[in-house]
Amino acid sequence: MDKNGDYIVGIDEVGRGPIAGPVAVCSFICKSEFFDSITIKTPLRDSKKLSAKQREEWYVYLSQCKKENLCDYAVAYVEAGNIDKFGIAPSIRKALKVSLNKVAQEPQKVFVYLDGGLYAPEEFINQETIIKGDEIHKVISCASIIAKVSRDRIMVKYAKQYPEYGFESHVGYGTENHYKALKKKGFTPIHRKSFIHL
């Protein structure tokens, strides 16, 4: 139980800045006491502060907790074509709404914590946006980890489909090698053309 809600929800997005691949938003729901019974030794923190191995460890652990009905989560994506069409901020809002509605059908019964500049739809009257929330609030950290690992796995699959671009290493961010590949090979369907200046 937390503030006015029976359940707490953490929301975070991953993939706002890359020049390729989807943006991902995770909504993670549990009861506050969920964090009292965690058995994993790796610290729970913002996904960017964890190694890939630590993120994977948490992902596996939280997936098992979901199977045991100790928590639930949903990740929603908006692909590059729609990001180009509608813009990154509306795309994130759409993915946020989709993921949140999957885990919280009764808005009045949850308290939603969101990272950074994210806001839940207005029917979620109990919500709080926290700057650097993925570092401060454990329920947002969980959402951050699930979103990051889920999106990274998608980019690894794209790396097999488009092996010349190195998606498995930079996961779509605009690195020097990524731009070199773009200049040599051109765009793929997963590139965000509105983000790229060659």
Image: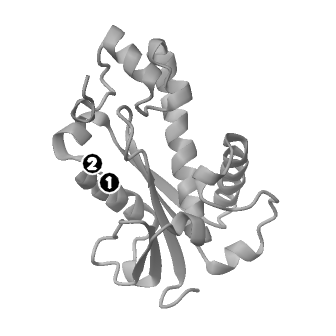
- The residue indicated by pointer 1 is 92
Name the quadrant of the N terminus: bottom right
Discs 2, 1 touching: Cβ within 8 Å:
yes
Q: Position of residue 92 (x, y in %)?
A: 32, 54
Q: Amino acid at mark 1?
A: Ile
Q: CA distance from mark 2 to mark 1?
A: 6 Å
Give the answer, above or below, for where 137 lies relative to 59.
below
- Along the viewing direction, whichever of 82 and 31 lies nearer the viewer: 82
* Residue depicted at 40% across the width and 31% down the height: 174
Q: Position of residue 53 (x, y in %)?
A: 72, 41
* Residue depicted at 49% across the width and 25% down the height: 167
Residue 156 seen in the current view = no
Numbered disc 2: secondary structure: helix
- The residue indicated by pointer 2 is 88
* Residue depicted at 42% across the width and 44% down the height: 15
Q: Amino acid at mark 2?
A: Ile
Q: Residues within 10 Å of mark 1 (few under 14, many from 20)?
A: many
Disc assigned to residue 5: none
Give the answer, above or below, for where 170 lies relative to 165.
below
* Residue depicted at 28% across the width and 32% down the height: 192
Give the answer, above or below, for where 17 lies relative to 13.
above
91 displayed left or right of 15:
left
Residue 123 falls in image quadrant? bottom left
Q: Residues within 10 Å of mark 2 (few under 14, many from 20)?
A: many
Numbered disc 1: secondary structure: helix
